[in-house]
Amino acid sequence: MSGALAGRRIVVPESRELDLFVSMLERAGAEALRCPLVSIHDAEDAAPIEAWLRRLVAGEFDDLLLYTGEGLRRLLGFARRAGFEAETVAAIGRTRRIVRGPKPSRVLRTMGLGPDIAADPPTTEGLVAAFAGLPMAGRRVGVQLYPECPDTILRALEAQGATVDAVLPYRYASHEEDGRIVEILNAMASGAIDAIALTSSPQVRRLVAVAKERDMGVTLARACDRVLVAAVGPITAEAATAAGWRVAAMPEANFHLKPFIAEIASVLATRGSPTSVDVKVSGS
């Protein structure tokens, strides 16, 4: 894939794997323009997180539902700081592990574990479908949530007779980099950018929020009409579609950075030469 993105300017609104993503794009020849949209922090109050983890360690859960890799990493961090990380890993290994998508699976593999059940497709609706085929009455389910997580799966599990014990280990702090976001939106709208590579639904919501706060709704719409809007997976694609954008690039099945970049390169190759609009965008 070396050189497949030569001359392309791609906005990278990533926070968790920003450096990795940028380096992969640059190896493919692209100019990656960093635009961090969402910073992530531990939940402010550690006490309920540690109490939830101690219930896990005590064997109070039959199932463990992991929505995000970030959430699992944060839980392990809380356990480490509280002095019982090894016990937490052992408890996760004893519990039936159910994941929404590939990111929690990757974190599990670093622990020498893997998922027992994975949603297909990797969405909340896929989780509901996965649980629909399981006898859940009387089972105790520990659920790792993420900020702004819908209560769809919680209601579905309770309707099946399960007892749900949910935890939210992290929070978003989004009001950062506003000036950079405005600069990027203007560059996209002017035609100076080839693509925006979205890797999470909060990124979409943040772009919409900034555009609304700055009275840039028309600019955002023009920006997303002019550039290739790419989404790493169906959850992000759904958010972008709901915002009114046409998602033109998304991996078919393997929702990781390498196939994501390959899909972006493939679609851009059908769109002619890289942008030649001479608009200065500050360094990546």
Image (tube, grey):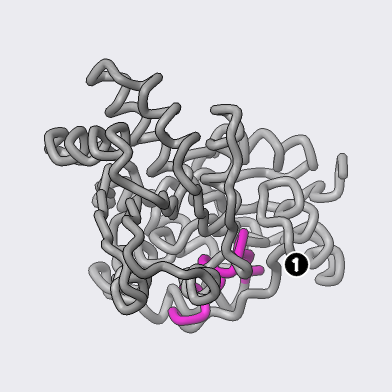
Q: Residue 189 placed where, x, y %? A: 52, 70
- Badge 1: few (under 14), some or many (20 or more) residues near its Cα, within 10 Å? few
Which of 130 and 122 lies nearest the eye of the viewer? Answer: 130
Q: How many marks?
A: 1
Q: Is residue 116 left or right of residue 24?
A: left
Image-quadrant location for residue 148: bottom left
Image-quadrant location for residue 169: top left
| Secondary element at image label 1 | loop
Which residue lies at the image location 44% right of the left edge and 73% below the top edge?
220
Which residue lies at the image location 75% right of the left edge and 67% below the top edge?
252
Residue 229 seen in this snapshot? no
Which residue lies at the image location 58% right of the left edge and 69% below the top edge?
234
Which residue lies at the image location 41% right of the left edge and 52% below the top edge?
63
Where does the magenta region start and end? 227-243
Q: Is residue 91 left or right of residue 131?
A: left
Residue 59 seen in this snapshot? yes
Residue placed furthest toward the front = 138
Q: Amino acid at mark 1?
A: Glu
Check residue 130 for magenta coloring. Answer: no
Check residue 233 for magenta coloring. Answer: yes
Which of 226 and 150 lies nearest the eye of the viewer? Answer: 150
Q: Is residue 152 above or below residue 277?
A: below
Reading the image, the residue beneath label 1 is 252
Q: Residue 23 placed where, x, y %? A: 67, 33
